[in-house]
Amino acid sequence: MSYNVGKYLAKRLEQIGIKDHFAVAGDYNLVLLDQLLDNKNLKQIYDCNELNCGFAAEGYARANGAGVCVVTFSVGAISGMNSALGGAYAENLPVLMVSGGPNSNDYGSGHILHHTTGKTDYDYQMEMAKQVTCAAERITQASEAPQKIDHVLRTMLRERKPAYLEISCNISAQECPAPGPVSTLLAEPKTDKTSLDAAVKKSADFLKGAERVVILVGSKVRPADAEKQAVELADKLGCAVTVMAAAKSYFPEQHPGFRGVYWGVVSSPGAQELVDSADALITIGPNWNDYATVGWRAWPRGKRVLQVEPDRVLVENESFAGFPMREFLSELSKVVTPKPETTKNTTAPKLEIPAAAPSAPLTNDEMTRQIQELLTPDTTLMVETGDSWFNAMRMNLPNGCRVESEMQWGHIGWSIPSGFGCAVGAPNRRNLIMCGDGSFQLTAQEVGQMIRYELPVIIFLVDNKGYGIEIAIHDGPYNYIQNWNYAALMDAFNGEKGHGLGLVAKTAGEMAEAIKKGLANKKGPTLIQCCIPQDDCTEALTVWGREVAQTNARPPIVND
Ligand code: TPU
């Protein structure tokens, strides 16, 4: 078979396990889209706009390891940068953004092109992309396409970060060499055995002297592909294991050592005490931002912490690198002795909310209780920025159940398009989304694509008539929204032939009925508008919001 640039890219995507890619058409990428369509092992999935397209690729990466979005120059790409590049960078997800670019003859020609700023320098998009990617390349010559495409994909997969390709619109169909072996993209850097041995020895010695050992799992354990090895270490140590909020579900909650979420004052019952009283705390891939530390108040540091990062280990002020996290955890597991002190007399947290009477008005607690009952080992629950985070934190998960959140980037509206992409990537899982009404208003139209592709996602639209999380942090008139008739939107999105279902739940009984109908609706999404009182939220949100507000309000240091 003879290759051209677009077909080369398609083949490489297929080889790295991509089955679907997300796109919004524009004249800079149409020929490229034709080339991608030509590969029968790749499906082209369409989005309503590029912000959603980027999020869909991001969600697909969560389900399937990596994601791809294809957009047009400037008007499309700059919109998609927020989600596909900035968001994926923050969340450590390999997402490739491919932007159609100007005709290769137009760079530096002095020509003014449509969709651009009206100036004649077309480097700005590439310069912007470089700030939020691990690799960015422009292809204006077919002969250089293979090495540039390979470089971008190799770096993206190794670093678990987004990458960018700009392909001139007149180059996609130009002939180029065939792809070589895929191993060139997947090869892992070699482990430095000397450094690994030294790190393991030093860490084992450190643990020898400790009795109260606790493991704290953070969100970077997943991009490091080390979840299994974290369990291995927990099995061997027999100690208590807590997770950070952004790592909810990254450690099996039915494991005998699991003791809940560590999140400072809003931790699961008992989890903060365990972490604070540990004389050796093993942190595995944490991400200590202001939200995670509750405004820098809950940030375990110092000599009692053995810090295991994706690319290094820090123990008692010594640092070691040159090996992957999973190898370190696995090797450490082989040499440590059991440290069961912290699992004695402690138990895993359990969400205990008594069921409401069917006629009782729906509350936040009852909604959460009913959603928790839906969780199975094959469920993925996407939780939007807002009180949905805090509701998910208190749920007990069966092993295998995934909670997806976007706690570092925190773009409201993420969950609908990302949930769409996630469902495309894993259509056989039970895909649930919990999304606040304020967030929903940013990206609502992507529900239309769930209808188009007949994805049976269930959306719990939390209708509390405002920005609950913002109200908790700092209230004002800007936190109140135009209320929509959310359930009725489904009819509009269905058009002539869709199978989307919109339902309203104002009581506990109506919610239970709506869930039954949602589970039976296999040919499209179901949106359940969960009407709860405006001031009804988790206790944790209120407490956390107060602390974060105080941190935001720290007075400036004045040097005079
Ligand atoms: O459940 P609830 O009421 O907390 O959630 P809802 O209604 O979705 O409200 C979310 C409110 C919110 C805002 C406005 N959370 N964070 N923000 C700030 C914000 C603004 N714009 C973007 C793109 N992302 C943000 N996080």
Image (cartoon, rainbow, N blue to C red):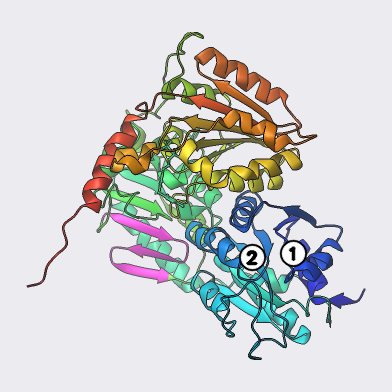
The question of residue 310 being in magenta is answered with yes
Q: What residue would you read off at disc 2?
A: 96
Residues in magenta, as a range: 304-320
Give the percent coordinates (x, y) of residue 489. Answer: 63, 33
The reply to whether the C-beta atoms of the residues labelled 2 and 1 are less than 8 Å apart is yes
Residue that appears at 54% across and 70% down? 133
| Residue 484: image tag | none
Could you tell me which quadrant the N terminus lies in? bottom right
Name the one closer to the observer, 318 or 13.
13
Name the one closer to the observer, 26 or 112.
112
Q: Residues within 10 Å of mark 2 (few under 14, many from 20)?
A: many
The mark closer to the camera, 2 or 1, is: 2
Residue that appears at 47% across and 59% down? 90
Could you tell me which quadrant the C terminus lies in? bottom left
Res 435 seen here: yes
Q: Is residue 146 above or below residue 508?
A: below
Give the percent coordinates (x, y) of residue 223. Answer: 54, 57
Q: Residues within 10 Å of mark 1 (few under 14, many from 20)?
A: many
* Amino acid found under the numbered disc labelled 2: Leu
Q: What residue would you read off at disc 1?
A: 13
